Image: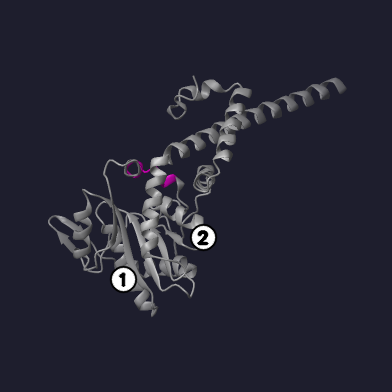
Amino acid sequence: MKIKNSIKLFIIYLLVFVFNTASAGEDLVNKVDNYWYVKNTLSDDVLGEISDISKKVMTTCRPPNCIVIGVGRSPTPIVSYLNLFNNKSALELPLSNFRYSPQVILRGEELIPRLSRKQEGKLFNYFNEFLMSKLGPEVEKVMLLDFTITGESLMSTKTYLDRFIKKQGEMILVEAFAVTTELRENKIKTAALDFSEPLPHTYVMNPNSPLVRAMEFEKFDGLAKYQKFNFLDKDYRGLPYPVQNSSSLRKEYLSYFREKLTGSSQKLSSKECLLFSEIFFRGRIKEFAGNPYYSGLID
């Protein structure tokens, strides 16, 4: 009986060991994948462009009297940069696929619809519960920021947020800042005219720049603070609320971003050495050899 129990106990220990080893291996794969995804996304050229845009934004909006609000997930790196030096500089407003106007806009065969009263009420509840609670009494102006191709989502958000703030009786100025390319600048101006809004502040980029390419491939969407969010989605019941992104990729992004821009290059070098030593130690080199992220690093 004692022998049988000993065998059973040995099998249990063996299974636990195998399971933990496999889990550790999976964790290592995720760590390395996350690290190299972030490192390749945040190249020196991309970080340089993020810095230039952020500095231009700061000339138009200075805390504590003004706060930047990134619309959707695309402004994630600018919001991260601004908050790196002052954590009350910027907020993120999840609002995907938002193209509406208080007055229907017809542009050829294209239609920008208006929200119904019920939908507008739902949107205003969202602004009130999610956004206004984050604005302190010292805020006199908000600057809506978006990487945009047409400017329509940015103008839609500005129009409805301005409408909401006036309805609340608040004395807060709403302005817009569009980050776009040389080929799209005229579309931004057209959108502003269509929405009867002042021309937004703009930062115009070369369409072939590394940051533009990263945006086109939606590289920053999985790094945003919140998951994709549409307040009119039928899956939401009652007052919608965005879901925070708690992924390990998001955490790696914040860590890398902070260390890179604060000059902690030694930490990053040490981290790379640690990750690769783990790979070799665990004999898992073959799992990474075919990955393009590690091209030139593993031969």
In this rendering, is residue 244 above or below 63?
Answer: above
Which residue lies most toward the left here? 108
In this rendering, is residue 32 above or below 53?
Answer: above
Q: Nearer the viewer, residue 44 or 143?
A: 44
Residue under the point 50% across and 34% down: 33
Res 293 quadrant in image: top left
> What crowding class fits label 1: few (fewer than 14 Cα within 10 Å), some (14-19), or many (20 or more)?
few
Residue under the point 35% across and 77% down: 166
Residue at image mark 1: 117
Tag 2 near tag 1, CB within 8 Å: no
Res 151 quadrant in image: bottom left
Element type where label 2 sits in the image:
loop
Residue under the point 37% across and 51% down: 52
Residue at image mark 2: 87
Q: What sort of colour scheme is used for the picture?
A: one colour
Q: Nearer the viewer, residue 207 or 17?
A: 207
Amino acid at circle 2: Asn
Residue 83 position, x and y percent, is 49, 57
* Quadrant position of the N terminus in the picture: top right
Residue 6 position, x and y percent, is 82, 23
Q: Is residue 15 visible?
A: yes
Q: Which residues are magenta?
A: 214-222
In front: label 2 or label 1: 2
Q: Earlier in the sequence, mark 2 or mark 1?
A: 2
Q: Is residue 219 magenta?
A: yes
Which residue lies most toward the right here? 2
Q: Is residue 173 magenta?
A: no
